[in-house]
């Protein structure tokens, strides 16, 4: 079993904008994606693009902020979300539900 929601504290917070209007993102609040979010993410041309789109949709932060994530933060978020795919979920043995 795995958590359906998580909050990832960013190794390197992301700042969008400048001066008084700057917004700092220091964490990502993630949950299981829904079908519509997955469908939107799969329109991307690359797997990284799909991950960026999916993280942006689920964390409800601008895509530009997700594009600035360091690799460690991108991988942590993507690993959490990949756990919900068929390949990431543990197999259920016969007789279990």
Image (tube, rainbow, N blue to C red):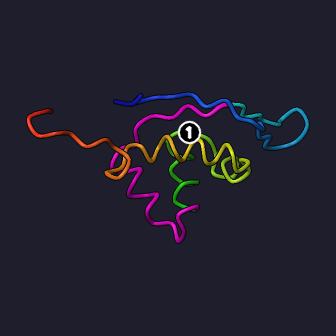
Task: Please report the residue visible at 59 percent of the width from the left and 42 percent of the height from the top.
Answer: 76
Where 49 sits versus 66, above or below?
below
In percent of width and height, residue 21 lies at: 83, 35
The N terminus appears in which quarter of the rendering?
top left
* 46 sits to left or right of 37: right
Asked whether 36 falls inside the magenta stretch, the response is yes
In percent of width and height, residue 3 lies at: 41, 28
Residue at numbered disc 1: 60
Asked whether 69 falls inside the magenta stretch, the response is no
| Mark 1 residue element | loop
Where 45 sits versus 49, above or below?
below
In percent of width and height, residue 69 lies at: 71, 47
Among the 4 quarters of the image, the one containing residue 27: top right
- Looking at this view, name the residue that lies furthest to the right: 19
Q: How many marks?
A: 1
Q: Which span of residues is magenta-colored? A: 27-48
* 15 sits to left or right of 73: right
The C terminus appears in which quarter of the rendering?
top left
In percent of width and height, residue 62 lies at: 64, 46
Q: Residues within 10 Å of mark 1 (few under 14, many from 20)?
A: few
Task: Please report the residue visible at 77 percent of the width from the left and 34 percent of the height from the top.
Answer: 24
- Looking at this view, name the residue that lies furthest to the front: 93
Task: Please report the residue visible at 61 percent of the width from the left and 34 percent of the height from the top.
Answer: 28
Task: Please report the residue visible at 61 percent of the width from the left and 48 percent of the height from the top.
Answer: 75
């Amino acid at each position: 079993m795995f958590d359906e929601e998580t909050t990832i504290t960013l190794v390197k917070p992301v700042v969008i904008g400048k001066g008084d209007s700057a917004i700092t993102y220091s964490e990502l609040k993630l949950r299981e994606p829904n079908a519509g979010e997955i469908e939107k993410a799969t329109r991307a041309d690359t797997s990284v693009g799909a991950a960026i789109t999916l993280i942006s949709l689920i964390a409800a932060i601008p895509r530009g902020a997700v594009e600035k994530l360091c690799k460690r933060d991108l991988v942590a978020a993507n690993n959490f979300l990949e756990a919900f795919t068929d390949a990431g979920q543990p197999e259920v043995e016969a007789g279990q539900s």
